[in-house]
Image (cartoon, grey):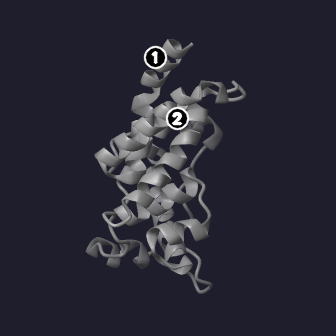
Amino acid sequence: MTTDLHNQLQAHRPMLLKFALRQLRNTAWAEDAVSETQLAALAKPTAFEGRSQLRTWLVGILKFKVLDQMRLNAREACHVGTDPDELADPIDDLPLDSRGHFSQLPADWGNPERDLSQRQFFEVLELCTDKLPAAQGRAFMMREWLELSVEEICKELGVTSTNLYVLLHRARLRLRECMELNWFGQQQPARAR
């Protein structure tokens, strides 16, 4: 059982590392989080009861290990809002109507259910997520992937809830724009711009 589990853990390592690296944006920290995840799985193999896929169970463990790494390395983490590229955001210049809503509707996204089942869709989504500015990417990943509460994210990033909502709004707008350029607006997906 232990040898089989060890082999399965090794097979999942690249996916776990990609997940951790996307959130932590530091190779050493991501490696530590993945190693801790694998050690936790090996220490208690009976904790995996088979009610979900092994991958799902490992990602659940990794979420906590990523948070541990963020807390451990909080002094070294980049500070939100210090990037000059994030001060002037071209998204702020999008046209609004008299009620403050976007005057242009988003492009027709076709059949999202069919597209969600396509692996290429997720590859383009990953590329678009990787293109987010660091602060927006961290906030988005903490909220949507790690499913942390607003209070937890604000505490981790040292921002107010208002600032967090702005970061999340901008991240979602950038993802929307990137996906429209690289997936929904083309026949063949391209590398994220």
Q: Is residue 70 something that shows in the picture? A: yes
Mark 2, secondary structure of its residue: helix
Residue at 50% x, 31% y: name it. 119
Badge 1 crowding class, 10 Å Cα cut-off, few under 14, some 14 to 19, many 20 or more, is: few
Return the x and y of residue 43 as percentages of the image width and height.
54, 29
Q: Is residue 133 something that shows in the picture? A: no
Quadrant that contains the N terminus = top right
Return the x and y of residue 95 as percentages of the image width and height.
47, 77
The Cα–Cα distance between marks 1 and 2, rounded to whole angstroms, is 15 Å
Residue at 35% x, 40% y: name it. 31
Q: Are marks 1 and 2 in contact (CB under 8 Å)?
A: no
Residue type, mark 2 in image: Ala
Return the x and y of residue 5 as percentages of the image width and height.
52, 19
Q: Which disc, if any, is residue 7?
A: 1
Residue type, mark 1 in image: Asn
Q: Residue furthest front?
A: 43
Q: Residue furthest bottom?
A: 98
- Residue linked to disc 2: 40
- Left or right: where does residue 96 sit relative to residue 76? right
